[in-house]
Image: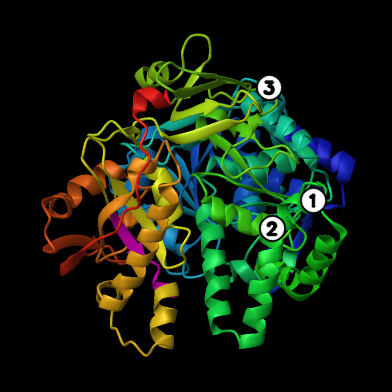
Amino acid sequence: MPALLARNVARYDGKPAYREKEFGIWQSWSWAEAAEEIEALALGLMADGVGPGDYIALLGRNRPHLYWSMVAIQMTGAVPVPLYQDAAAEEVAYALDHCGARYVICGDQEQVDKVFEIQSSLSGLDRIIFIDPRGMRKYEQGHLVSFEHLQSEGRKADTAAKAELSRRWEALGYDDTCVMLYTSGTTGRPKGVVLSNRNIIETSKASSEFDGLKTGDETLAYLPIAWVGDYIFSMGQAYWTGFCVNCPESEHTMMTDLREIGPTYYFAPPRVFETQLTTVMIRMEDAGRLKKWLFDRYMDVARRVGPAILDGKDVSAMDRLRYKLGNVLVYGPLKNTLGLSRVRVGYTAGEAIGPEIFDFYRSLGINLKQLYGQTEASVFITQQPDGEVRSDTVGVPSPGVELKIAENGEVFYRSPGTFVEYFKNADSTADTKDSEGWVATGDAGFIEDSSGHLRIIDRAKDVGKMASGALFAPKYVENKLKFFPNILEAVVFGSGREMCCAFLNIDLTAVGNWAERNNIAYSSYQELSQHPRVLEIIQDHVEEVNRSIAEDEMLSGCQIHRFLVLHKELDADDGELTRTRKVRRKIIAEKFNDLIEALYSGKSEIYTETEVTYEDGRKGKIKATLDIRDAKVAPAQTKVLEAAE
């Protein structure tokens, strides 16, 4: 990465490398200016005692300073370890202790407080560096030092120090460690994934060429810096192609900042697209009769011909005219509102996206595609080429990637991006990656003979059989349920049982908006979630999903027979979701075992008490009596697992 930085300074010099919005104003740094900031920090770190092989953690929101820090750390021969900014103190403590971090770079006072809370349990932590000085004036200095101070010291460095820094980064090899990223910990403790310079740069090069990314592209860096996708998009690809990385002012201004930047290259996990669609649908419910009529009429046209026009397929002249008119009246203004007007290449990944949600965005003319990847692959395993985009596949192998399907249906891959190892965990490394470099993804799927596209069914450990022998794939059903703006989260049960049942979370924004329009008073999420009219709406959604599932011969046995709406939102702070908002099924099943038993025992309601974690870290209990509903199922065309295989 330091070598790519030097190349970009020579090649692009004054072109923008970073932008950040602060106090409502966009500030910009060219490649040359960014390089100066990075070198000053690297020299300051080196003067402060950072040496080759040290591990330095980073905590905070997306800021140029943290991206600069990662390159500066690499320059000194140390290893950057970005962590999730919303991680609880004990999660941060585990990562810092596991990697033996000597330094932590914190974005602001909140992150410094988090480290202070756990500092006594970390014998190896020597220094806490803070970027934003707000609120830090009266803090005891001790282990504390400001980012600005380190840079100031670095700018005073003499010729000998600069020569030593050059020697260090020029000594970096292609197979040396580039970064260490922790997995989300869906099934247990997070694992430290060691990725080499070869992993990151070869993957960035191949994926950039696949989509024709170029220097003039713009991207918005708003996803967690600890997530491998952000590292590839905001570091690897940005440094390979030389495009500009834009950092929003805060998560609360992200949508406004997105509209102002108008990125040409955009990535978002399904939840972001689901939230944006929910916002659109809420606004249309409040719109006047004419606007709603125009929206419904032209969205029908968009769904019918939009994806075909986007893929360059034959469409009648009349339909093209209707679509152009719709673009003037509906699609164009809508894309502008979403901040997606200029998107040339868009991706979603992280988990499966509902087909209806995916098709909605493509119908607007947004080139949204799917990729399949994981931290251990440096993101990319498969991608969808332009003109071959479908909602039911995740594309063909990315350049340089090989795929194979095991006898049990599990997907394996190997590529230049394949991780080096799990840090201090040789057993897990051996279980995941064999001697020939093949990596077990943990996902079940198959490759289509006709197209070569990969289709993912579900997590291999989650796919099973129902008592009838029918295939059980919970994620397939959950994604269909989450298409409805009123449903935020869903967890489906049924493996080894006679029928499927589900826990649901309502979307407080969508349902709250509906309640306001219908003069329904409520004082809390819990009260609204159990309102009879809300439950009726959710039941209608469940039964509509059942009718859709019944049309799938292989998965029609997964219809929901009974469900309940949880009295609380599933939360990462309560251990029910990972920091990337993936469902932790085992923990949920253990924590809410009384609710599962009630669903399968035929009860019509259940009283429960649940421990929750408040924002300030205190624990409390929520008590509730939950209504359990029966849902109508459509005639099923089941296919037993053996036949499906």
Which-is-in-front pick, marks 2 and 3?
A: 2
SS at mark 2 in the image: helix
**Badges 1 and 2: C-beta atoms under 8 Å apart?**
no
Calculate the distance from the C-alpha at mark 2 to the C-alpha at mark 3: 35 Å
Residue type, mark 1 in image: Asp
Residue type, mark 3 in image: Gly
Q: Which of the 4 quarters of the picture holds residue 614?
A: bottom left
Most extreme residue toward the top is 435
Magenta extent? 502-509
- Please report the residue visible at 77 percent of the width from the left and 57 percent of the height from the top: 29
* Residue ID for mark 1: 217
Give neighbour class at mark 2: few <14, some 14-19, many 20+ (Cα, 10 Å). Answer: some
Q: Which mark is residue 400?
A: 3
Q: Quadrant of the N terminus?
A: top right
Residue type, mark 2 in image: Arg
Q: Nearer the viewer, residue 605 or 337?
A: 605
Calculate the distance from the C-alpha at mark 1 to the C-alpha at mark 2: 30 Å
Q: Is residue 250 left or right of residue 536?
A: right
Rendered location of residue 107, percent (x, y): 52, 57
